[in-house]
Amino acid sequence: MDPGEPSVPAPAAAHGGPVSHAIFRLARLHKLTAAQLLRRTGLHPNQELVMMRLWEAGPQRQADLAAAMDADSATITRTIQRLERAGFVRRTPSPTDGRVTMVAATPASRGLRDDVEAVWTELEERTVAGLDEQERATVLRVLDRLEANLTPPGA
């Protein structure tokens, strides 16, 4: 197989978008690999992103967490409920506004942080295996450019 040839041929309808088809395939495989690695932590994909945000930023309003995760309120509510049932987060009313729900990582989640970091390290290693530093930097530059191309103005 030539390096420029996809491992999975694009369906005829996707021939006008080979880059988009490649991104779709890569995103699917990346998510599947992440899910496989996360199983050992008891988390599902995206739950670790919520936990990372809480570990880094500390307690925050549920609405702010949804905005930071680019998730709708129903999705973030379900995610937080699952994390709460697992004992990794707690929700409390805001001390200044009872209409606002605050979300915080629990002390029980501290051990989980090391596991999540190990998963992300392994995911990164698998993703960029065989690429040298220059190639990795190029991949990051190209991905940043593609993200900028797709980000709506003012977002």
Image: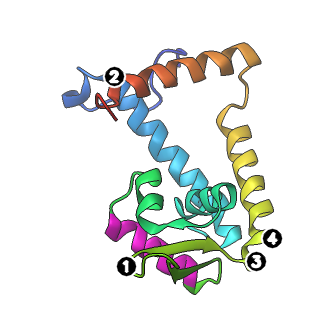
Q: Residues within 10 Å of mark 4 (few under 14, many from 20)?
A: few
Relative depth, front residue between 84 and 146:
84
Q: Which residue is mark 2?
A: 18
Whether pointer 2 and pointer 4 mark residues with C-beta atoms closer than 8 Å, the reply is no
Mark 1 touching mark 4, by CB under 8 A?
Answer: no
* CA–CA distance in space, label 3 to label 2: 46 Å
Q: Amino acid at mark 3?
A: Pro
Q: Secondary structure at mark 3?
A: helix
Residue 111 numbered tag: 4
141 horizontally vs 116: left or right: left
Q: Which residue is mark 3?
A: 107
Give SS at disc 1: loop
* Residue at image coords 37%, 79%: 99
Per the model, the C-alpha gap separating discs 2 and 4 is 42 Å
Element at label 2: helix
Three-letter amino acid code of the residue under disc 2: Pro
Looking at the rendering, which quadrant does residue 101 occupy?
bottom left
Which of discs 1 and 4 lies nearer the camera? The answer is 1
Vertical side of 72 occupied by 82: above or below:
below
Nearer the observer, disc 3 or disc 2?
3
User: Counting residues from the N terminus, which is met first, the one under dot 2 or under dot 4?
Assistant: 2
Q: Main secondary structure of the magenta part?
A: helix
| Of marks 4 and 3, the one in the foreground | 3
Q: Could you tell me residue 128's position as x and y percent?
A: 68, 31
User: Sequence-wise, which precedes: disc 1 or disc 4?
Assistant: 1
Q: Which residue is mark 1?
A: 99
Residue 9 visible at all:
no
Residue 8: x percent and y percent?
Answer: 42, 33
